[in-house]
């Protein structure tokens, strides 16, 4: 296997580099990537920061040299010591707090995980959140395992044609170069995992990704033993029709539970990240019923030990299948739960919005999980209203859906330059207690000039990154002049730079700022106070309205009249996101209220000193404090039409820009420092960094959900 081919050339003194390469823990250590960079900087770039590929290609002579280089070895030993500390989870928060619960595993199921560019198994916010959750679980010493899918073709790579058409291409996933190891293969004892479903067998291969002390187990059906259509089953993330979708979800939920059994992992608590994985609840009930419990007893037990997180108030965002489709796949299953057809279908039954009903995965999850949450305070409230009909005997406020507000994994998202600044002024061990709000009071000790200069540096890095990307494509004749222009070559490092990057879904209203083109041009072209905007994001290939948003923005970016003040960065992914959230001056979010369940990119930006300008939706509803960014507030009545609301919100956006953001940014003192701006930046960091961190979030899940569920599990 690949790990061995890497090992062959590895000198004994630094042999653990291989282990490090296969553990994504390295990716969120400020100093670990230095090891690889130091070995061969060019190759590190060429292999896109994928240490597995890197070690496969590096010249043995360079490894030999490093093995006798004292500076390298000192660094290596330091990293390995920290690595071992993480692996042992000794002194970790969870172990210190709940030593008696250390043996209780939490299984975290998710259809996608956003972990690193080398693993294209995520599409957007949901996946990034799952990745951040698991990384933080490792940092806190939580006994958590992830369950998901390898998609052999991953999510698509985006290119935009000169006419603005989004083209999707799928790279074949290179298993040998990915930071994961096979766990169940045809050569394993017992062979591939055989899932007997509906009278047929589907074979599953299992891979393991390591994140510090946490492992994520990924299932793959692309094996010779399967029929072609089963091999294709996990080919693409969110590809295919309803039929593919339900079969994927059966593998994820039911297959996931059986996979854990095969691996000998017996979780005390199960967490379904969104409804995609919720068949896991049925499979757990089936196991208990087969062991002699009644359906009701089993369902009660499963409820008490299951956490369910819902992620969207957009109705189409909730998976629902026709009863016919469900029946087709479950007709030989419900009996093993001790249910008949009607009782089984009732578990997922929910109005389809057109007078009928279908099998709704969120309704199923809400019925079979005992701890349920939305992902921000406002989203919790919206969810209680949205699902109120399932608890008609309760008032809306009593609907048992809580909220745990999303946060971002600080070590992953903080820029190395900001990390250095925080180390200097907050204390060298700031990362160890970065969810402590009092620590962040000291952000005001950072001299304005130092903060401003650090930000300028990050902004230059981002602009260079964008230019280099299109320049390389230009050289390779992979980009025409239009893309060189729209890729950001005319951007001005002195202009106030707004970032808008996320999936192109219509509710996010990417075109809002273009409602009054003349007014926007005036803002952009002010000679002394220029403004520019950078867009990035993918539209799901099946989402025609989303794709047409991209075309329109592309068309505007190409327009002479906008003078190169609009850029579009192709192929938005974790790598691009890191540059954007660290490099722009302001992060903009203007969804249609209240459709943004949380949003997390604004949290990443605020951590790095780019304040948020947003509709008071998602996390910003609770994050906005008046002095740490801007609220786009139009004060339209709740029953206003979408069009009226868009007009009013656009008006509020222009007003906020013209009257507040632009004047503040360009108000410089004699040293060229915008004092009042830097003050606001510090407030943005101080208020967002501790609270909207994955650390605060995972601690909350632990204390409010996981620990009580573990105690419930032990009672039975
Ligand atoms: C953070 C992130 C997202 C999520 O963006 P939202 O603000 O939640 O819309 C999506 N894609 C990538 C690559 C990200 O890093």
Image (spheres, grey):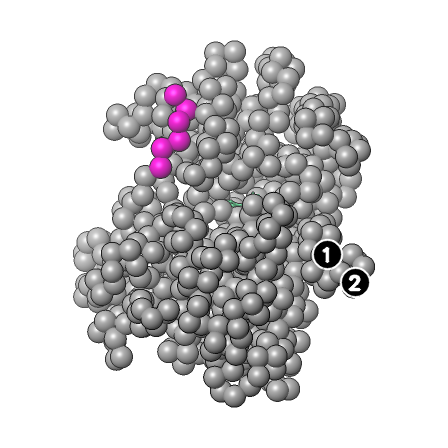
Nearer-the-camera pick, 282 or 463: 282
Residue 499 in the image: above or below residue 216: above
In the rendered image, residue 353, in percent from the top left (x then y), is placed at 62, 46
Q: Residue drawn at (46%, 19%), measured in percent from left and top?
A: 555
State the image quarter where residue 602 is shown.
top right
Q: Residue 460 placed where, x, y %?
A: 48, 32
Q: Which numbered disc covers residue 394?
A: 2
The vertical placement of 159 against 87, above or below, is: above
- Mark 2 secondary-structure assignment: loop
Earlier in the chain: of badge 2 and badge 1, it is: 1
Image: magenta residue range: 163-168
State yes or no: residue 119 in magenta. Answer: no
Q: Is residue 586 visible?
A: yes
Q: Distance between the residues labelled 2 and 1?
A: 8 Å
Q: Mark 1 points at which residue?
A: 388
Contact (Cβ within 8 Å) of mark 2 with mark 1:
yes
Residue 34's spot in the image, x, y percent?
A: 39, 53
Q: Quadrant of residue 212?
A: bottom left
Above or below: residue 259 compared with residue 526: below
């Amino acid at each position: 296997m690949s790990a061995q081919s890497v090992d062959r050339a590895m000198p004994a003194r630094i042999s653990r580099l291989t282990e490090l390469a296969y553990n994504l823990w390295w990716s969120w250590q400020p100093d670990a990537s230095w090891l690889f960079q130091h070995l061969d900087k060019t190759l590190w770039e060429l292999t896109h920061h994928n240490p597995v590929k890197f070690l496969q290609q590096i010249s043995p002579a360079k490894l030999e040299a490093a093995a006798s280089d004292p500076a390298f070895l000192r660094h290596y030993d330091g990293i390995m010591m920290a690595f071992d500390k993480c692996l042992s989870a000794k002194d970790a928060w969870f172990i210190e707090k709940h030593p008696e619960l250390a043996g209780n595993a939490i299984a975290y199921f998710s259809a996608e995980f956003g972990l690193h560019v080398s693993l294209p198994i995520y599409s957007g916010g949901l996946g990034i959140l799952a990745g951040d959750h698991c990384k933080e679980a490792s940092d806190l010493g939580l006994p958590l395992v992830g369950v998901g899918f390898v998609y052999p073709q991953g999510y698509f790579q985006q290119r935009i044609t000169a006419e603005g058409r989004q083209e999707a291409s799928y790279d074949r996933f290179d298993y040998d170069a990915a930071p994961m190891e096979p766990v169940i293969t045809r050569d394993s004892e017992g062979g591939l995992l055989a899932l007997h479903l509906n009278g047929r067998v589907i074979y599953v291969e299992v891979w393991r990704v390591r994140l510090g002390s946490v492992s994520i187990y990924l299932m793959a059906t692309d094996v010779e033993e399967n029929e072609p259509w089963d091999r294709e089953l996990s080919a693409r993330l969110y590809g295919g029709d309803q039929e593919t979708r339900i079969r994927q979800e059966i593998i994820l939920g039911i297959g996931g539970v059986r996979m854990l059994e095969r691996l000998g992992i017996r979780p005390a608590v199960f967490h379904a990240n969104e409804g995609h994985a919720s068949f896991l609840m049925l499979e757990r009930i089936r196991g208990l019923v087969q062991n002699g419990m009644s359906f009701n007893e089993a369902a009660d037990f499963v409820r008490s030990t299951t956490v369910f997180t819902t992620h969207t108030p957009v109705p189409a965002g909730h998976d629902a299948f026709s009863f016919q489709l469900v029946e087709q796949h479950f007709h030989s299953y419900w009996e093993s739960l001790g249910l008949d057809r009607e009782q089984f279908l009732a578990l997922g039954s929910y109005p389809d919005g057109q007078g009928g009903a279908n099998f709704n995965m969120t309704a199923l999850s809400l019925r079979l999980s005992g701890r349920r949450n939305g992902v921000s305070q406002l989203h919790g409230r919206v969810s209680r209203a949205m699902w109120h009909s399932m608890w008609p005997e309760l008032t809306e406020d009593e609907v048992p859906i809580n909220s745990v507000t999303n946060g971002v994994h600080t070590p992953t998202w903080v820029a190395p330059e900001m990390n250095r600044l925080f180390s200097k002024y907050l204390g060298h061990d700031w990362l160890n207690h970065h969810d402590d709000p009092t620590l962040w009071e000291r952000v005001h000790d950072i001299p304005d000039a130092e903060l401003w200069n650090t930000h300028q540096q990050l902004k230059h890095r981002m602009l260079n990154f964008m230019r280099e990307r299109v320049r390389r494509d230009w050289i390779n004749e992979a980009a025409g002049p239009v893309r060189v222009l729209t890729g950001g070559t005319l951007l001005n490092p002195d202009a106030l730079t707004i970032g808008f990057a996320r999936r192109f879904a219509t509710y996010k209203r990417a075109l809002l700022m273009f409602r009054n083109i003349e007014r926007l041009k005036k803002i952009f072209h002010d000679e002394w106070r220029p403004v520019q905007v950078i867009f990035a994001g993918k539209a799901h290939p099946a989402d025609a309205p989303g794709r047409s948003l991209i075309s329109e923005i592309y068309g505007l970016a190409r327009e002479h009249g906008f003078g190169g003040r609009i850029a579009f960065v192709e192929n938005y992914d974790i790598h691009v996101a890191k540059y954007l959230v660290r490099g722009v001056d302001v992060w903009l979010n203007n969804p249609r209220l209240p459709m943004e369940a949380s949003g997390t990119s604004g949290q990443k930006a605020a951590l790095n000193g780019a304040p948020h300008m947003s509709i008071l939706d998602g996390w910003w509803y609770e994050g906005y404090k008046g002095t740490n960014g801007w609220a786009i507030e139009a004060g339209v009545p709740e029953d206003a039409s979408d069009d009226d609301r868009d007009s009013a919100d656009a008006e509020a956006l222009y007003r906020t820009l013209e009257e507040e953001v632009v004047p503040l940014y360009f108000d410089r003192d004699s040293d060229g420092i915008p004092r009042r701006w830097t003050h606001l930046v510090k407030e943005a960091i101080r208020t967002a960094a501790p609270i909207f961190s994955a650390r605060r979030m995972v601690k909350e899940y632990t204390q409010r959900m996981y620990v009580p569920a573990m105690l419930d599990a032990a009672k039975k």
